[in-house]
Amino acid sequence: MSYIGNQAENKVSPAFMRETLSPDGSATYFDLIHDVPGYQAENLLVTVNNVIQEPVNAYTIINDGNNRPRRLNFGVALATTDSLYVIHRGSGELYHTPPANSVGTAQLESNLKSGRVDQFAGSAGASSNTVFTLSESAGSVNTIAVFINGIYQRPTTNYTVSGTALTFTSSLDNGDQVDVHHHTLRTTITHVADASVDTAQLADDAVTTAKLDTNIAVGGTFGVTGITTLTGAATTGGNLTVGGDLTVTGNWTVNGTTTTINSTTLTVDDKNMELGSVASPTDTTADGGGFTLRGTTNKTILWENDTNQWNINQKWTENAGSSFAHRPLTAQLILG
């Protein structure tokens, strides 16, 4: 057919096509079956209870989640009693999903069909007349048809295939003619090679928490340059090194046998320090408890249960104005 001017675009035009929609009292948007060209609200006539709605102010056209301009958005829910219909006033592409099992080789472009035929011949004196290399990989024994001297060979029974390797269960005779007909689809898309995806292939923010396993194991070094917030429990099976400040807002429990503090100054806000706080404290468990100041010879203040008194291995010096009293009955040491 001839045209005056530019030839018409090869598009299906649903112009003036009507769609009736059913509000459920909660939905604020509705997905249409046709595109609204350019996301332009003016390309759609919308009526609610037979009252024409103003484009942009009353409704907009947004992405339907599949990158198509098909979602009619009101921003507010319509009542179940509301009558809603739309009329398409612009042209757009019509998307159609073929029914299941309806796409065969006839519906495919010729460059997607693999009608290739490989031909081989048995060789006299060859060490092996059972393995031949195909020109392209076969998906399985059922994606090729194999003939020897025009006689059809049964898959698996007469031959097997692995990639491009065609293997016969019996050796060919000299002069045997082999025809292999491929019935697979050609494609330039292959699987992603191992270790081929790194940060260069990932878009920013492409990996979300929804794509992460609930249990993540890091076999090497795990570096965090920003702030890390843990909302649940954290368990480490190895050593933990903190290069900066560590603030614990809750209680801190150390279950090991040795706690070492290498700081120059230790400041404790609490004015009462408890020692020997075991599950069931007794005078026996308190025996030998106290303080040790390391030096050439250790300076100690230790409790001796048998004598019911503190043992101090160094002299005490009483400053002027201070007093020292020992009360054996209560076993107290008072420094004034």
Image (cartoon, helix red, strand yellow):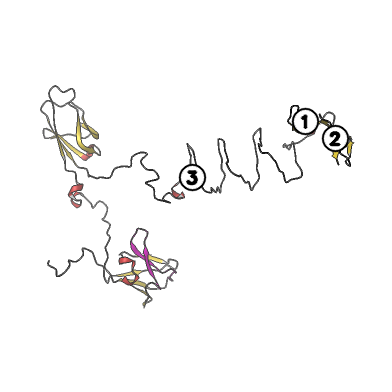
Mark 3 crowd level (few <14, some 14–19, many ≥20, 10 Å Cα): few
Labels 2 and 3: the sequence-earlier one = 3
Label 3's element? loop
In magenta segment, residue 67: yes
Whole-angstrom CA distance, mark 2 to mark 1, is 14 Å
What stretch of residues is rendered in magenta? 57-80
Whole-percent x and y of residue 319? 86, 39
Q: Identify the amino acid type marked 2.
A: Thr
* Residue at horizontal 65 percent and vertical 43 percent from the top: 252
For this rendering, which residue is in front, 316 or 291? Answer: 316
**Visible in this render: residue 326?**
yes
Whole-percent x and y of residue 193? 33, 40
Q: Are marks 2 and 1 in contact (CB under 8 Å)?
A: no
Provide the residue designation for mark 3. Answer: 214
Whole-percent x and y of residue 288? 77, 30
Q: Is residue 313 left or right of residue 10?
A: right
* Residue at horizontal 39 percent and vertical 48 percent from the top: 202
Whole-angstrom CA distance, mark 1 to mark 3, is 52 Å
Label 2's element? loop
Provide the residue designation for mark 2. Answer: 317
Q: Quadrant of residue 81?
A: bottom left
Image height of 238 relative to 12, above or below: above
Q: Identify the amino acid type marked 1.
A: Lys
For this rendering, which residue is in front, 168 or 187? Answer: 187
Of the numbered discs in the image, which one, if any, rests on residue 299?
1
Q: Quadrant of residue 117?
A: top left
Whole-percent x and y of residue 178? 14, 33
Q: Identify the amino acid type marked 3.
A: Thr
